[in-house]
Structure formats: structure tokens, C-alpha cells
Image (cartoon, rainbow, N blue to C red):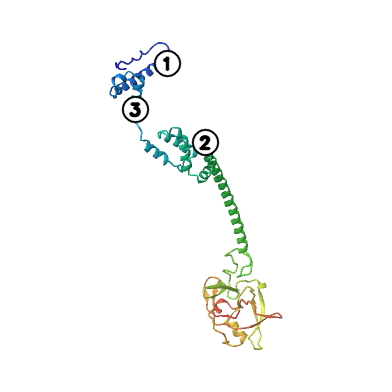
Amino acid sequence: MTSGKLPVPFPMEVKGNLRDNWTFFESQWDNYEIATECYRIFQHLDIPDGDRKKVSTILKALKEHFIPKTNVIYERYVFNTSDQLQSEGVDVYVTRLRGLSNSCEFGTLQSQMIRDRIVLGTRDSGARSLMLREPDLTLEKAVDMCRASEIADSQMRKLSSTEEVNYASKKKVKHEIKKRTSEMEEQSNCRYCGGTHAKRECPAYGKSCLQSSTPKVNIVEETDSSSDESIYTLNALTDKQWFVNVTMSMPNTPNNKSIKCQIDTGASCNVISASVLSRIAKQKKPRMVPTKTKLKLYDGSTLLPVGKCVIKCTVGRVKKKPGISGCGDCRQRCSNIIVSSS
């Protein structure tokens, strides 16, 4: 090597197995080129002349040239600040620590240093707590405990996901049952017509007045301040079963008048027209008490009553104050509505 003479590769054999011959020749040529380059570097290394024939000295000098001395303090800093990444599994993290520890010159303490780094750097606080309780914790035990915890967490996430799906399914079923129940409730006990129908499909809406055949809906609500309260249906239905003859008279008067009325037991007050009140009282301007109550029709419009009064009502042999929903007057003649005390 000191003479600078390197063995030249044997010539390429063009006979026999050409594939094997070429592979051998190519390998010799690569070795020749590498050795030639190393020899050039060797010529410039600071090696005493007496040691240039010693193989161990030559290899040591070449190693120091190709592998420069590392900064151990920095390498250990990198190792000791390496925590487990969020995307790293336990095995990947341990493999990375082993690679970093190779340049830290830990020697026989390498396994212990990796163990300590796992305890301090793992993102699993539960596994860390278990490892700190282990008096004879080894690297193998630490890795096994972290793996077990990782597997358990994965299984718990799968179970939790299944429970969430089941909960969502149950919640959907409950919602459907509640929806159907709500729809059934909406189809019963209409406070306007007394019948059974779907929401916003009251048969009273859009019906003609009994007397004038005018398509007016006289369904009203009593409103006071900001609250709305349904009262009754006025001339909205044609079914005779909704009408009864009510004997009415003013208090302290012997005059009785039979008025055909529609009964609405859900009403909070009794409503009649001003003309009917005049017939009952046999006066053009019967005595009434002023009221601030407003009547709200089914279509959203409102009427202002002229007042209220107390009327004695008898249905058959029963004397009471039924929910009276009007007489034969159409809406045009019932613009002034009387509201009695409820």
C-alpha cells in the first residue's frame, strides 16, 4: 500500500458463464476504485512513517477521518429531550430512542438510560404511573407495560365508538316515537272546532257563514296584554249537533229569550253579538261594562268589543253560563262583540 501499487482486476473472461464472469469482474473493479480513493486520502493523513506499514494504525487513522468525533453533550441533550410524539406508537418511540442512544456513549448504562427516557417521555400518564410504582423496573418491563396500556386504550376507543353509535340509534328511535306521539296529540281535541284532525287542518277554517254564505271564519281568541286565549268558534260549522237553544235573560228581569247557540265547553268566556243582546234586553242600548279585552279571529285579525255584561242562561232545566259561540248573525252584523264575565 505504501508503494502505491494496487492489484489490477483480472481481465474479463469472455468464455464460460458470461453472467458470473461479468459479476466477478465488476466487483473487482469497484474494489479497485474504492481502494484507489482511500489510498489518496491515506497519503494525506498525519501518520508517522514508521507506522504507515501497520494495518491497525492505518485503519484507525481512516476511521477517525471518515467518522469525526461527535459532541457527546449535544447528542445526550437530543436524547434526553426526546418525548413520545402524538403520532408515535410505543415500538416506534423505543426504536427512535435506541438509535439516538448509539451516539451518546452510554456504554453499559444504555438500557437504563432508554428505560428512564421511556418513563419520562411517554405521553401515557397512566402507564407512567404504573412504571413508577414498579421497584425493579427494567427496559423490557417498561416496554411491555407501555404496549399493554396502548392496546387497552385502543380497545376502549373502539368500545366507546360502538356505544356512541348505539346511543345515537336509540336517541333517533326515541325521537321518532316522540314525533309520532306529538302528531297524534296534534290530531285530537281541537280547541276551535272540537273535532279531530291534523295540525293546521281545522275544518272551520275557510267555511261559509250560515246566514250569508260568506267565506268568513269567525273563530276568535280573547287577548289581553301579550297573551292569547282561545274562546270559541263562531258560525264555523254546519253540523246541527253543535247547536242548542239557550234561554237567556238579563239579571233581575222577567224577559226570557230563546237563542240558538253553539256550545264550546273549552271557551273561557261567552260571546254574542250586540243585536242579540238588544233582543234579550229588549233595549237598543243595553247596559254594559267597559272592557279592554280584545278578540282575535282565527285568521289573525282582531275585534274590539263594545263591553261586557252578565246574562242568565238556561239550557233545558240547567241554569249556568255555558260557552256561547254566537247566534244567527253573520260576521258583518257582529262587528260589535259583547264579552261577558267568565
Three-letter code, disc 1: Asp
Quadrant (top left/top right/bottom left/bottom right) for the N terminus = top left
Q: Secondary structure at mark 3?
A: helix
The part of the image, by quadrant, that contains residue 237 is bottom right
Name above or below for residue 176 compared with residue 258: above
The residues tagged by marks 2 and 1 sit, at their Cα atoms, a distance apart of: 47 Å
Which sits in the foreground, 178 or 217? 178
Instruction: Name the one closer to the observer, 289 or 91.
Output: 91
- Asked if residue 29 is positioned above or below residue 147 in the image, the reply reads above
Of the numbered discs in the image, which one, if any, rests on residue 140? Answer: 2
Q: CA distance from mark 3 to mark 1?
A: 37 Å
Q: Amino acid at mark 2?
A: Glu
Q: Residues within 10 Å of mark 3 (few under 14, many from 20)?
A: few
Task: Point out which mark residue 64 bears.
Answer: 3
Q: Residue 87 in the image: x percent, y percent?
A: 46, 42
**Outermost residue toward the top?**
15
Q: Which residue is mark 1?
A: 20
Q: Earlier in the sequence, mark 3 or mark 1?
A: 1
- In the image, what residue type sits under mark 3? Glu
Residue 71: x and y in percent read: 35, 35
Q: Disc 2 or 1, which lies upstream in sequence?
A: 1
Instruction: Give 305 or 64, whichever is nearer the viewer.
Output: 64
Seen in the image, is 272 located left or right of residue 57?
Answer: right
Q: Earlier in the sequence, mark 2 or mark 3?
A: 3
Reply above or below: 320 against 144: below
| Residue under the point 42% across and 40% down | 80
